Image (spheres, rainbow, N blue to C red):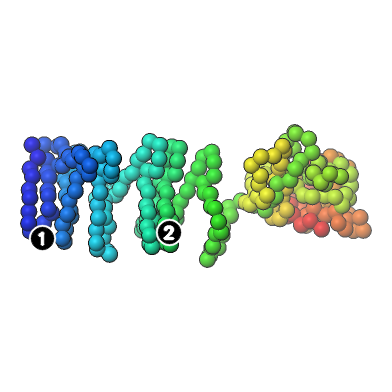
């Protein structure tokens, strides 16, 4: 049986429920599961050794509802003293935790060493914040991420509107690429040298010193595109072409041994680059500079894209 207390003392909880046998401290069910009001302390305080301190259930309103008039305290406060979660919100088909603010921050998370805000949802938003004049979602951390987002199959983040960054933008991958239409419906191997055809789409190069060279298909070797421009959701066949930065490129050294720093151009071998040893022909057809040598045969080497 729960021990119930009703107090008029301003320094004590208005209602206190405690269960020493391991059950629920307080259970409320109705329009509002539990309503507690206090001038200076907790409106409702529940304590349990191995179950829920407070359980609220409601079919039409909030299961637990908290309001505070203090600028330094929250309407609902959750703390964990042994390393678990301070507040947990779960939902089968909607928002796990939602924050709404008229003038301040919709949801704010702060952490000394971990993530400021972490949210998980199976089919909707892991964390959703909405504000009319302030921040919809605000996260702050002194050592790690203010906000961390991860997705295994889709986009980790999606923004409608402008983005302002006051410090560095760090991209872990290598090149800046742009999606282009590819001739035909077959996917071309990454590292292939591409040229522009008469219709404006791209195809593999097949002749030396071709001024129609567009770049190299990004994604070969250990270099992946850090930024891809002109992504289109619906298209027949588009692939990213490295326009700037480092990319692995297929090269053929049968036309001349390649050394570090050599300029590269298109070769007669379809989709392969070669050393540009003719400065007159090379103008307008250079792909970039070799970052590693290749003494003979065909290979895949990193290059620095420098279209000219």
Tell me the tag on residue 138. Answer: none
Judge whether residue 56 can be spotted in this image: no
Q: Earlier in the sequence, mark 2 or mark 1?
A: 1
Determine which quarter of the picture holds residue 29: top left
Residue 94 image offset from top left, x and y in percent? 40, 40
Graded by Cα atoms within 10 Å as few (under 14), some (14 to 19) or many (20 or more), the crowding at tag 2 reads: few
* Closer to the camera in the image, 89 or 141: 89
Q: Where is mark 2, residue-wise?
A: 132
Q: Position of residue 302 (x, y in %)?
A: 71, 49
Residue furthest top as drawn: 186
**Is residue 233 toward the left or the right of residue 266 in the image?**
left
Q: Under tag 2, what secondary structure?
A: loop
Q: Residue 35: x and y, percent?
A: 19, 48
Q: Position of residue 183 (x, y in %)?
A: 79, 38
Q: Please tell me which residue is depicted at 37% across the width and 43% down the height of the picture.
A: 96
Kindly state the secondary structure of the residue where label 1 is placed.
loop
Residue visible at 56% across and 59% down in the picture? 162
Q: 306 or 136: nearer the eye?
A: 136
The C terminus lies in which quarter of the figure? bottom right
Closer to the camera in the image, 139 or 37: 37
Q: Is residue 253 above or below residue 104?
A: above
Q: Nearer the viewer, mark 2 or mark 1?
A: 2
Q: Which residue is mark 1?
A: 10
Q: Are marks 2 and 1 in contact (CB under 8 Å)?
A: no
Spatial separation of the CA atoms under disc 2 and disc 1:
36 Å
Tell me: 206 left or right of 187. right
Q: Residues within 10 Å of mark 1 (few under 14, many from 20)?
A: few
Residue in the foreground of this view, choosing between 17 and 143: 17
Residue 73 lies in what quarter of the image? Answer: bottom left
């Amino acid at each position: 049986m729960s021990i119930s207390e009703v107090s008029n003392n301003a320094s004590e909880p208005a209602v206190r429920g405690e269960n020493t046998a391991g059950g629920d401290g307080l259970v409320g069910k109705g329009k509002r599961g539990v309503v507690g009001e206090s001038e200076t302390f907790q409106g409702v305080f529940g304590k349990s050794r191995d179950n829920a301190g407070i359980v609220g259930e409601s079919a039409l309103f909030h299961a637990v509802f908290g309001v505070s008039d203090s600028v330094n305290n929250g309407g609902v406060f959750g703390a964990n003293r042994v390393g678990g979660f301070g507040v947990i919100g779960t939902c089968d088909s909607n928002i796990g935790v939602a924050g709404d603010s008229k003038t301040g921050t919709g949801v704010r998370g702060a952490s000394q060493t971990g993530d400021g805000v972490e949210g998980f949802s199976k089919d909707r938003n892991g964390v959703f914040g909405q504000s009319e004049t302030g921040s919809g979602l605000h996260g702050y951390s002194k050592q790690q991420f203010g906000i961390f987002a991860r997705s295994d199959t889709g986009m980790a983040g999606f923004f409608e509107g402008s983005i302002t960054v006051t410090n560095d933008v760090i991209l872990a991958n290598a090149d800046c690429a742009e999606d282009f239409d590819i001739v035909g419906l077959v996917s071309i191997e990454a590292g292939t040298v591409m040229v522009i055809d008469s219709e404006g789409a791209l195809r593999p190069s097949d002749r030396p010193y071709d001024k129609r060279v567009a770049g190299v298909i990004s994604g070969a070797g250990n270099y992946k595109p850090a930024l891809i421009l002109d992504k289109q959701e619906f298209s027949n066949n588009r692939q990213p072409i490295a326009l700037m930065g480092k990319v692995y490129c297929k090269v053929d050294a049968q036309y001349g041994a390649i050394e570090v720093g050599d300029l590269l151009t298109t070769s007669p071998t379809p989709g392969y680059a070669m050393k540009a040893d003719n400065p007159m022909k090379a103008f307008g057809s250079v792909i970039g500079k070799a970052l590693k040598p290749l003494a003979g045969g065909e290979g895949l080497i990193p290059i620095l894209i420098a279209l000219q």
